[in-house]
Image (cartoon, rainbow, N blue to C red):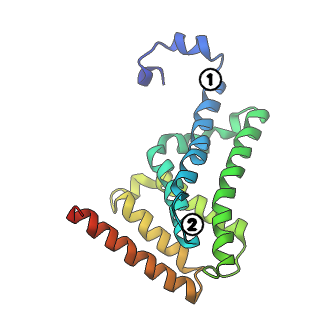
Amino acid sequence: MAKNAKVSVGLIYQYYGEKEDLLFLALLEIVQAYKSKIPPALEQVETPLERFTAAVQAYCRVHANSSDTTMLAYRETASLTPAHRKIIKQYETETNELIAQCVRDCIAAGVFEDIDVDIYTYHVIMFSHTWALKSWYLRTRMTFDDYLERGLDLLLRSVLTPYGIEQQEKQALRARRKRRSAASGS
């Protein structure tokens, strides 16, 4: 960390007493990133399915941009003090609620089957973490955007109602039109 920041190790310890404090701050940064990235991704997004998709994409991009921190979280969270673990868990719970609310909205709109929101939310979370944890393998087979698109398709296939399938097709058509328009410079 000191090398990346181009400062001495002593300077870091002047501000942070122990390695555990640095670990906590690194983990806190990623859970705070979820809370700062997901809500703006949902602004101006109207349909429940588009909101769900935007939330998942934002969550996944946090991990794609912070793979090392995600891996660190898996390896080292247990070494935090109980008080620090409690804070990290609280942030994670709040972030998961952002995804869960999108799932509930999709169920209420008839886009998703009536599913177990908690289990499905954690499937989404694990899908998001997988890029960071297994990118050594996945990067050799696809881009992050391919992973995101293909994974979202798999996640959605298991829960979409017939109406939801119609909405997904409309969403895909709008996305293709938007890409074409951007590519043509219009």
Upstream in sequence: badge 1 or badge 2: 1
* Three-letter amino acid code of the residue under disc 1: Lys
Viewer-nearest residue: 115 or 103: 103
Residue 19 disc label: 1
Q: Quadrant of residue 139?
A: bottom left
Quote the CA–CA distance across marks 1 and 2.
Answer: 37 Å
Q: Which residue is mark 2?
A: 52
Viewer-nearest residue: 165 or 149: 165
Q: In the orientation shown, which residue stands out farthest toward the left?
A: 184
Task: Report x, y in % for residue 155.
Answer: 54, 72
Looking at the image, residue 186 lies above or below residue 58: below
Task: Report x, y in % for residue 77.
Answer: 66, 39
Residue 98 disc label: none
Residue 59 appears left or right of 96: left
Label 2 residue SS: helix
Looking at the image, residue 87 lies above or below residue 124: above
Instruction: Give the quarter of the figure containing the C terminus.
Output: bottom left
Looking at the image, residue 158 lies above or below residue 41: below
Residue placed at 54% from the left, 44% from the top?
71
* Three-letter amino acid code of the residue under disc 2: Phe
Residue placed at 78% from the left, 35% from the top?
82
Mark 2 crowd level (few <14, some 14–19, many ≥20, 10 Å Cα): many
Q: Nearer the viewer, mark 1 or mark 2?
A: 2
Label 1 residue SS: helix
